Image (tube, grey):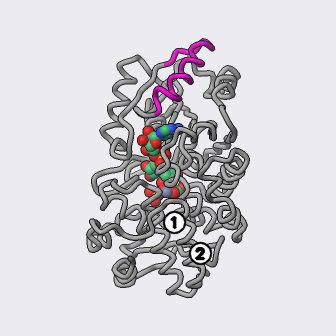
Amino acid sequence: MATFQVELKRVVDDSYPIEIGFDLMDYLVEDMKNGLLGGKQKLAVITDSEVEKRYAEPIAQKLEEAGFAVNIFPFPAGEKSKTRRTKEMVEDAMLAKGYRRDCGIIAVGGGVVTDLAGFVAGTYGRGVPFVNYATTLLAAADASVGGKTAVDTPLATNLIGLFNQPQKVYLDIATWKTLPQRQLSSGMAETIKHACLATKGEFFDFLEQHMEELLALDPALCEHMAEENCSIKYHVVMKDERESGLREVLNLGHTVGRAIETVSDYRLLHGEAVSIGMVAQLHLSCQMGHVTKEQVERVVKLLKRAGLPTEIPEYIDREALVKKLYTDKKVKNGQLRFVLQKGIGDVVEFPDGSFAAPVSEETAREIIMKMD
Ligand SMILES: NC(=O)c1ccc[n+]([C@@H]2O[C@H](COP(=O)([O-])OP(=O)(O)OC[C@H]3O[C@@H](n4cnc5c(N)ncnc54)[C@H](O)[C@@H]3O)[C@@H](O)[C@H]2O)c1
Ligand SMILES: O=C(O)C(=O)C[C@@H](O)[C@H](O)[C@H](O)COP(=O)(O)O
Ligand SMILES: [Zn+2]
């Protein structure tokens, strides 16, 4: 018998910039000309059917004019496309067009596109570089930053994927003007989540003061919101990229949120599901003495003003919802775990340094059954 030790102490610098502003396509092209994505000349623009004409085509055209070889790989818009099947289809289309390891990927779209394209990038030819060009509030607030990439399976969302950081992220606020109101509200759920878990209430106060103006896309206010969202998210990611502890705070509202998203068969958008999940965690946090009834009401009121649901829809089978909670990635040794809000703008940290509380199935069921 012999034992060898393969020493692979890799020092990786995965740092990257995030550009926030209006109409950022020309900046992307300039960056590409200056060697972003390692100077790769063959580029795959991955997008969805709704975003293709408006944003992916102009980006592809500008890149072609700058001398790059570009093809667009679109898939049908919507969460139901975030699957292994779609990933395979995109990959096969890229293979057929001669894309090999010497290519780069540009994800143009919302969170479904950035999650899927980032996953494709992580496995294509064992990994090629990519950038995210976010075109929804939700992707700008959350999905395009932090390197969680994944696809859904019939069992639940995001079960297959990898941590894979982009080379750069562009948050183009100008794209929000074509977003349907329901999608804008969906992005507002992750924004309110951020306000509930960080900045000690400052960001929450801002959202309370300006919700209607934000939904009406006031430019300066939207820019501030985008910057706050981004700053909250990347500061957490910088401290705990692979979710060994602190990053779990970004999962506030997602224990019930992700479960209800699947049980609704995606009738609920991600942010809508998170909104209902936020209400569930608020009830739990209140029951455990971490938030007051008034604070629960304050958050629920803001979610409603953002156009978000705060009640479990009638068509949801609540017992199925309780079972689905076990697909959550925070589950440890079969134990459900919830991130809990502490007042407004903070979360509960436990003495062992963890950020998710063990919660019995009975307690989780009680909360879910009691909710409106
Ligand atoms: N990786 C992460 O950290 C993270 C964080 C939060 C959410 N997510 C994931 O993000 C996804 C939700 O993202 P989403 O809400 O952006 O969904 P999405 O990508 O499906 O976009 C929503 C809809 O808006 C359309 N659209 C996109 N940009 C548009 C624009 N500018 N104008 C008009 N229509 C536009 C899309 O075609 C789609 O129909 C979920 O799959 C969720 O799991 C990931
Ligand atoms: O970035 C994170 O970490 C998050 O948890 C952000 C969430 O808003 C996002 O929905 C994420 O995709 C959820 O991940 P999962 O690990 O619960 O599947
Ligand atoms: Zn989310």
Can you tell which mark lies on residue 194? none
Specify which label sits upstream in the sequence, 2 or 1: 2
Element carrying mark 1: helix
Residue depicted at x 40% and y 24%: 94
Q: Which residue is mark 2?
A: 298
Residue 354 sits in quarter: bottom right
Residue 59 sits in quarter: top right
Q: Which residue is mark 1?
A: 304
- Residue 343 in the image: state x and y as whole percent: 63, 78
- Residue 319 in the image: state x and y as whole percent: 27, 74
- Residue 211 can be seen in this image: yes
Magenta portion: prevailing SS class: helix
The span shown in magenta is 51-70
Q: Is mark 2 within 8 Å of ligand 3?
A: no
Is 249 drawn above or below residue 55 in the view shown? Answer: below
Element carrying mark 2: helix
Residue depicted at x 57% and y 43%: 165
